[in-house]
Image: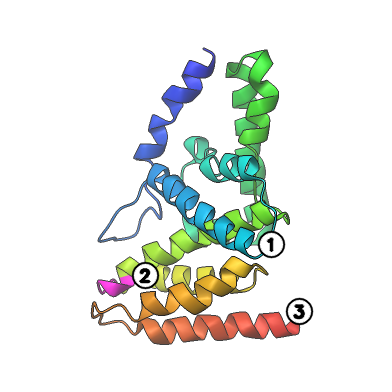
Amino acid sequence: MGIHYYFRSLNDLERIIRCPGKFKFEQHSVAAHSWKVVQYAKTLADIEERNGVAIDWKKLYEITSSHDYGEIFIGDIKTPVKHASPELRLLIQQVEEGMVYQFVEEHIPEAFKDTFHRQLREGKDNTVEGLILEVADKMDQVYEAFAELQRGNSEKEFIVMYRNALTKISSIPLYCVDYFMNDILPDMVNDEVLSPIDIKKITEEALAIGKSRSLKS
């Protein structure tokens, strides 16, 4: 079917809801998540550039805009299941990558296969662009969970999501992480909207865990 089949498949990302199976005041699709990750990433990359870090912008946009394309085939698996063990997480990733590879091989014209394999690959790695993607992805988890907690959603899943995402972000050695922690996160936590859940306490606990892990490493 050619590239048309790829373009048409993008509609599926609008119908896949993140964090399935849990009560939410606001539902977010994978498509909306991907768009937000791109927005976070470009600002994070600007912060890196301001600190003298060279950014491969083409690579950054490719990996951030397409990082969850594989969920078209497997959906968004519940976080407790996805992260139940490193072995299971690796297996899920392998299945997802295999299905993406098969899709490209079956539907994309030969002249574009190398391009699509590059663009739809797993982009999280130890390059600055890969680390920015990791931070941006986790930032959206922080914002999604924060919005639920702020509205009084006491589902344990969102507390765990918020804490784990903050802990992960704090462990990544980038200038933009320092900026997020020192300039953005305080504004978020001190938001004037009242919440029956002590978000400030949860935030402090998450940052303490991240600091402890950093000292051990």
Instruction: Give the residue at x 58% y 66%.
Output: 176
Q: Is residue 68 visible?
A: no
What is the number of the mark on residue 64? none
Q: CA distance from mark 3 to mark 1?
A: 26 Å
Q: Which amino acid type is shown beneath numbered disc 1?
A: Gly
- Above or below residue 216? Residue 50 is above
Q: Is residue 194 magenta?
A: no
Q: Position of residue 131 (x, y in %)?
A: 65, 58
C-alpha separation, residue under disc 2 versus residue under disc 1: 32 Å
Q: Secondary structure at mark 3?
A: loop
The mark lying in front, picked from 2 and 1, is 1
Question: Which label belongs to residue 52?
Answer: 1
User: 103 or 200, which lies in front?
Assistant: 200
Per the rendered image, the range of residues in magenta is 149-153
Where disc 1 sits, the SS reads loop
Q: Are marks 2 and 1 in contact (CB under 8 Å)?
A: no
Q: Secondary structure at mark 2?
A: helix
Against 22, residue 66 (above or below) is: above
The structure residue drawn at horizontal position 67% and vertical position 43%, both measured from the top left corner, is 94
* Amino acid type assigned to the residue bearing label 2 in the image: Phe
Q: Residue at x 69, y 62 (%)?
A: 52
Can you identify the residue that label 3 sits on?
Answer: 217
The C terminus is located in which quarter?
bottom right
Q: Where's residue 213, x and y in %?
A: 67, 81
Q: Amino acid at mark 3?
A: Ser
In the image shown, does 10 or 153 lie closer to the viewer? 10
Nearest-to-viewer mark from 3 and 1? 1
The residue under label 2 is: 146
Q: Is residue 150 magenta?
A: yes
- Indicate whether 38 appears above or below 141: above
